[in-house]
């Protein structure tokens, strides 16, 4: 078989079916996943579960959902033409139980046709704080879908919902992951990020951010930059866990991430896409199992894009009259007033936001749209990955019991 | 204004609104335009006028159109959030007169807000051979839209329909272009490609394909390769015209292209996107006006992608049992039978295509999906452009009158 024209990255020739939301403007769902996956060389087939003007963080959104019948028709057209042979599937936000059932049914058949199909399921259901933002009857369907998935990428809210275990300690986290692995024959869980107090994280001795990330920090570090991990006891750090089940044992890696304050949309969607992109990379480091390898690559890409977006939004904020956060950590530090850009809350207190004129909020949101296009070189280049560490669960349990 | 994070290509910060069709699998409409534009650094806002499983060339397609009300709602959401400030707009296939009216109305308002808006209108209505493939009531709306457009990218059928002049000679072509320019105050026409007998083209002495193209030809040239321009009197060449109206005068450049036989979809959509991408490039050659510069860049990209797709589809054809064309030119050449891959028609004669099982046709179509993802480096790199030549209309008219 000739390979004429098939040069480039290792994924060349692989095809991903991505089923997520579409927004006309901005980067969430398929819009956050498709271009980065294509930049890495994947042909991406794109089923849009909604078509909205923009993501819901803008406060106002208009558009429509793809009905279950419309989804079924699309799948039918692909099936008739023999186009449902993707070796990889990615699913994100799907707006209703009926639509989710149509999708599940197809994935079940595709997996029956090809048992080695790699399916990354992002069980988009809600978040700590906002709670459930899909209809309640979606939850049991997601629980059934766990059996089909190769990898899931839940957040804390979703881990708790799917496992039925509230995460209040490393031990309850261990129980929740183990339950998901064993009850659902779920090989891989990339638990995207959970905020943990730095005191607890310190006991894990997780590595610091890598040079590929820190070299992107503005020099000198401006006072408004959200420095992280300065060691103060009230600091919070985000921790990502990559957990796989091998031969009756759970092997989990942990990665510590800087907290960047502010509302950014599509971060989880980009993360899921990048985990799928880098999972079972033939050029992977043989010393690192497939999931922690993929998570390490995904985290570096996501954190780089997030940092570039954050710095860009702060630098442009005054120009556009939009808001930027005060430093996250050490809010009581006596910084001179003019060295800090006022926070959204402070700006809104000075000049209350007219709910009928969401343009100021919209401009703020616009500046926080992920800069996946501008920073495409970072997606392509790869870098050294985000450093993580294998967790010794036994040791942790013993420590916690002391 | 800080430029933190704004590195990369010249288009950084520019935003394009692209209104076209979406297919889940394959590359036409927005799928052919979006990724290449993003690869060149544009943020692209994507309104999908349909969501189909695949393009209609597969013989079977399923999916749905975005209704005029749904389109209006999307525009409304964007307007409320102040997101309709694009400096560039691209429109392609829009499925109905009602939908087209919604789009036209918005573009008219956006142009009123920003008179320097660059609007590339691809008046997708039909083709020589297939005829009109949109509803007839779309035609008068497109005629009205010409007044809004900065550039249009019609094919021969559309030039004839919009101008009311049948193109049977270089002189009638001149009349048609001139009428479009003057009646509609239309600054730029990129007439994508018209097949002309080589004898007529020879009188124009157009330049040969550039090194960036010829270096991609398989070496040695296999017998099934569609060589072009060998000088035989019955050869056909495709000619693209880039015509601008300056100070009451029409300035037209012509570009000769190899004919690649076979049905490829999305070629015109990719061309339109690349013309818009490269139009008014600040780094353009000052000796070349904006439109011929953009067309020169667009043609090189399109021809490179098309050649790579063609070579790939031929090389893979036997593997997949799909068909490939016999050489286009000199079909009577006594080539040994086993040196030529049978044509689609020959294969279908041997084993008739079951209309209820379109998978063979689908596999053929699949192989001819534009390789925009695999060949993204060609899109990014730019190359030297496709060489063209300024036409001396007076001289041509005199020649033809002899």
Image: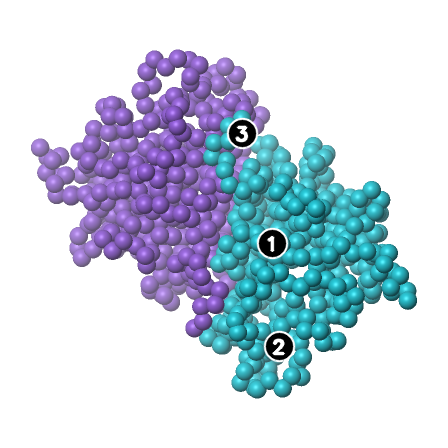
Chain colours: A cyan, B purple
Q: Is label 1 in contact with label 3 (beta carbons under 8 Å)?
A: no
Instruction: Confirm whether circles 2 and 1 share one chain.
Output: yes
Picture residue at 64% right of the left edge, 57% below the top? A386
**Chain for numbered disc 2:** A
Q: Residue A137's x, y, as percent? A: 76, 53
Residue toward you, A402 or A178: A402
Instruction: List the residue tagged with mark 2.
Output: A327
Label 3 crowd bin: few (<14), some (14–19), many (20+), radius 10 Å: some
Q: Nearer the viewer, residue B28 or B142?
A: B28
Q: Is residue A373 visible?
A: yes
Is B51 placed left or right of B40 in the picture?
Answer: right
Q: Quadrant of residue A230?
A: bottom right
Q: Secondary structure at mark 2?
A: loop
Task: Determine whether, in the image, residue A200 is placed left or right of residue A272.
Answer: right
Residue B272 tag number: none
Quarter of the image containing the C terminus of chain B? top left
Q: Which residue is mark 1?
A: A384
Measured Cα–Cα span from mark 1 to mark 3: 39 Å
Residue B158 position in % (x across, y down)? 33, 41
């Amino acid at each position: 078989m000739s390979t004429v024209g098939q040069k480039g990255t290792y994924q060349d020739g692989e095809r991903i079916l991505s089923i997520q939301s579409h927004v006309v403007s901005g980067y969430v769902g398929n819009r956050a996943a498709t271009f980065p996956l294509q930049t890495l060389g994947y042909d991406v087939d794109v089923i849009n579960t909604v078509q909205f003007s923009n993501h819901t963080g803008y406060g106002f959104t208009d558009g429509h959902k793809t009905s279950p019948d419309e989804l079924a028709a699309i799948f039918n057209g692909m099936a008739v033409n023999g186009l449902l042979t993707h070796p990889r599937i990615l699913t994100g936000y799907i707006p209703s139980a009926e639509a989710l059932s149509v999708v599940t049914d197809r994935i079940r058949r595709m997996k029956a046709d090809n048992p080695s199909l790699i399916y990354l399921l992002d069980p988009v259901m809600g978040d700590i704080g906002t709670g459930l933002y899909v209809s309640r009857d979606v939850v049991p369907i997601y629980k059934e879908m766990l059996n089909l998935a190769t990898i899931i990428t839940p957040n804390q809210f979703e881990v708790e919902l799917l496992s039925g275990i509230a995460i209040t300690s490393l031990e309850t986290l261990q129980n929740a992951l183990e339950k998901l692995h064993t009850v659902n024959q779920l090989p891989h869980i990339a638990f995207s990020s959970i905020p943990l107090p730095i005191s607890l994280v310190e006991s894990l001795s997780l590595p610091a951010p890598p040079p590929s990330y820190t070299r992107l920090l503005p020099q000198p570090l401006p006072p408004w930059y959200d420095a992280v991990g300065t060691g103060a006891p009230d600091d919070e750090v985000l921790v990502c866990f990559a957990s796989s089940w091998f031969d009756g044992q759970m092997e989990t890696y942990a990665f510590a991430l800087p907290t960047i304050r502010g509302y950014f949309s599509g971060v989880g969607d980009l993360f899921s896409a990048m985990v799928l992109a880098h999972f079972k990379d033939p050029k992977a480091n043989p010393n690192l199992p497939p999931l922690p390898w993929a998570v390490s690559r995904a985290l570096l890409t996501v954190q780089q894009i997030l940092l570039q977006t954050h710095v860009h939004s702060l630098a442009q904020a005054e120009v556009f009259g939009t808001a930027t956060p005060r430093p996250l950590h050490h809010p009581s530090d006596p910084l001179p007033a003019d060295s800090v850009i006022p926070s959204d809350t402070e700006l809104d207190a000075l000049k209350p936001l007219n709910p009928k004129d969401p343009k100021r909020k919209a401009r703020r949101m616009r500046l926080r749209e992920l800069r996946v296009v501008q920073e495409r070189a970072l997606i392509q280049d790869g870098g050294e990955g985000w450093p993580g560490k294998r967790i010794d669960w036994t040791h942790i349990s013993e420590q916690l019991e002391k």
